[in-house]
Image: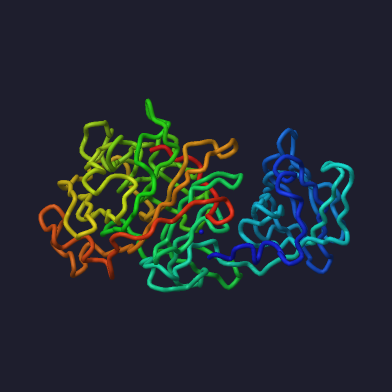
Amino acid sequence: MKKLLLLLAVSMNALIAIPLCNAQNNPYIMIWDINSSQNINLKVTGGTPYKGQAATSPGVGGSVNAGYPYAYVLFSTLDIDVQNLAGVTLYSTTIKMVNDGTNTYPQDINNYLVFSYNATNSYYGANAWENRNYFNITANAIPAPATITNEGWNSGMGNTFVNGVSGNSFWAIDYGSELGRWTVYNKTINQSTMNYGYGSGSRAYAVGLTQGTDGQWSGTAGIGVAKDGLWQIDIKIGSNGTLNKLMPGGTNYFCETFYLAERINLTPGVQNYLDGSPAGGDAGYGREIDIMETSWQAAGPQINLPGGGNTGWILNPQNGSPGVNQKVANWSDVGGAPTSTYVTFGCLIRDNNIWFYAYKADGSQWYATDAIPLNNSSYQQQGNFVPYIGTWSCADPAADSPDGGFATSYNNFVYLKQDDAKIAGLNPKDNPTAFGKQLSSYSLTKSKPLIVRSRKNVPKLIAKPLPK
């Protein structure tokens, strides 16, 4: 996905930190203590060791049990099952080490667990390897999945809730709590590309959220979850639009996107992500419709109908086929990239045809494609499309992924059923005045840039690279 910020993750007023330089260059060794009253144990299922170490501590299969402090905890990320005292797994989550520029601490990406620093029981030796940072662990009620706030911008989700509320739609963040990665600015939502030690990009998708009687959350078919209809959003490009490093001669690490991808399991989490890239998503292949991508073409936006795993809109997509890695316009038409104004990008799917389109800030149509018919009958789409927004980096997040130094701004998301009265029987190619900004509740032109000065005043996290 929100912004629970650090509130549920750490009791900040109790936090005493190792200096930033020490936390970045030396180990942060902890003691974890679960009070017996919590009635939970933690079992390690995976994770990323601290640099130079062969394994996490505790290692895979190891446990931190209530009433028995674990005296040597060291890792970069730790995957755990939270179990009751009978050994039944209640839920699974990942703990990551966070450095916010002042403090270092463990954080549950799903906010199931609260880590509170205990200064009295902590002690420090001659060097970082002798330090022990003591944390008391308590269990939270199961919170809603991480989401972008709907307050302060036109999210298109039909509500202004800050955090997930059952029975409503949100932009859910697959990668969990991101501590400021997504921020409201100038009545828009902005995704930073800063690297805070664990990457520099992300993604979010529109979905309904429901909490069951057992307290567990799931994704449902909310606003924008469908197999056909119209999806559009206003975007202000933050990058210079040049080729990314996956392309010959490319120097750019970032790709700004608005796309649809099939999703069978709508519940947030990277393990449920599908796409049509050559490698597929974490959950495998699904049909993908790239409405707008930067950095795959040197001087303009690209549309794409990828066909990984034979999931493509068209059978055996090749460069030169309509909608396949197709440059549709030049950034110079809208003043260059980064853009100083918001451009509206969208697509319409109706009766097994798809149209791509874009509109300039003044409301005039920038481009619209002819209808591209679905001709891949060998793949039967099972899940609905969900719309994704986000900017990803092709750098290795485990390495020194560079700061992007910019933000991508989004606003005015619109989803309409294909037979909605506003567009029934119309398409953007033949009826240009019926689409674009006139479908938004309001429009934006020029706005102040989101200034990126330091890691202390700009947002966080990353999605893994998702080459199209």
- Residue 439, horizontal then vertical, whole percent: 23, 66
Residue at 38 percent of width and 49 percent of height: 238
Q: Reply above or below: 320 against 47.
A: above
Residue at 20 percent of width and 38 percent of height: 322
Q: Reply above or below: 52 against 452.
A: above
Q: Quadrant of residue 311?
A: top left
Q: Is residue 4 left or right of residue 353?
A: right
Q: Reply above or below: 242 against 406.
A: above
- Residue 129, horizontal then vertical, whole percent: 84, 41
- Residue 441, horizontal then vertical, whole percent: 28, 70
Residue at 40 percent of width and 38 percent of height: 277
Q: Quadrant of the C terminus?
A: top left
Of residues 65 and 457, the one nearer the viewer is: 457
Q: Quadrant of residue 127?
A: top right
Of residues 67 and 336, the one nearer the viewer is: 336
Q: Reply above or below: 237 against 465.
A: below
> How many numbered discs?
0
Of residues 94 and 21, the one nearer the viewer is: 21
**Residue found at the far top of this picture:** 248
Of residues 111 and 212, the one nearer the viewer is: 111
Q: Is residue 261 left or right of residue 200?
A: left
Residue 206 in sight here: yes
**Residue found at the far left of this picture:** 430
Residue 290 in sight here: no
- Residue 363, horizontal then vertical, whole percent: 19, 60
- Protein image colouring: rainbow
